[in-house]
Amino acid sequence: MSVVDLATATWAPGTFLHRLASPARDQLRAMAPRRRVEPGTVLISQGAIEHHVLLLHSGISKITALTSDGVESLLAIRVNGDLIGEMSALNDLPRSATATACTPLVYSVIRRPQLRAFLEQEPNAALALAGMVADRLRWANQFRVDFTAYSAKVRVARVLVKMALAYGRRTPAGLEIGFELTQSELASLCGAAEVTVQKSLRDFRRTGSIVTGYRTVTVLDLDGLRRAAEL
């Protein structure tokens, strides 16, 4: 997997816009006016009954959900080129998660009738959407496998490797994960206790694999972190 520099990339690999041919991509991008929001803005709320989708033109959003005991769990990260909210647009059910801007973010709101008309006119776009949904399901399944098959420390290393490769920004030191990530968010993404994540990060810092700052992680030794991740 290649490294995506969010400062220069147009669409991250694997996102919906990356999968589309240029004419279809341009058509979708021009479908609705763009909106700009600041970090912390809630874009979609879990449980809301609405069926539009959001198209991210730039920026990063986190996808979270409340568990039955009221704990917020980080499910995924979405970046420029991604589509958010497609599940409710396709199955008429309430929103299954909350989307919140992590960085200054530019997006557009695509209404369900617009999306359906677009997919009918562009069969390849419908296949691209199906591929995107399948990849997200595959990621969720792999997460379940990792959760049961590997120790918490290995899971932390795997998540850091994946994020560095997918969202890493090159710096003189290494690959800086291109958005703020708290230890509690990392713990929920890894399916580990926060204290375990803290210990794992200390171990990775001691071996020179990473350096951490305020809500930031920079991978210094990707090969070393891969070995810790058993990849």
Image: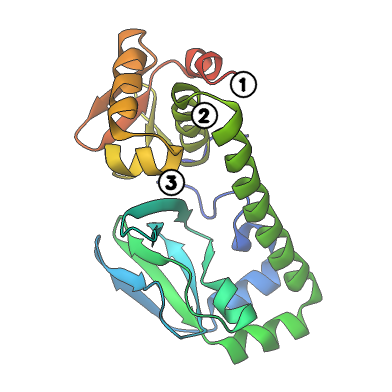
Report the amino acid beneath label 2: Arg
Residue 24 sits in quarter: bottom right
Which residue reaches farthest front?
69
Residue at 39% from the left image edge and 61% from the top image edge: 68
Mark 2 packing: few (<14 Cα in 10 Å), some, or many (20+)?
Answer: many
Q: Are marks 2 and 1 in contact (CB under 8 Å)?
A: yes
Residue closest to the eye, 26 or 186:
186
Q: Which numbered circle lies on residue 6?
A: 3
Q: Vertical placement of 74 versus 127: above or below?
A: above
Relative to 208, 93 lies left or right: right
Q: Position of residue 211 (x, y in %)?
A: 29, 21
For the residues labelled 3 and 1, the Cα–Cα distance comes to 25 Å
Which residue reaches farthest top?
207
Image quadrant where one finds the N terminus: top right
Q: Vertical placement of 209 versus 8: above or below?
A: above
Q: Secondary structure at mark 3?
A: loop
Image quadrant where one finds the C terminus: top right
Report the amino acid beneath label 1: Leu
Q: Are marks 3 and 1 in contact (CB under 8 Å)?
A: no
Residue 186 sits in quarter: top left
Query: How many numbered marks does the figure carry?
Result: 3
Residue located beneath label 1 in the image: 231
Q: Position of residue 50 (x, y in %)?
A: 47, 85
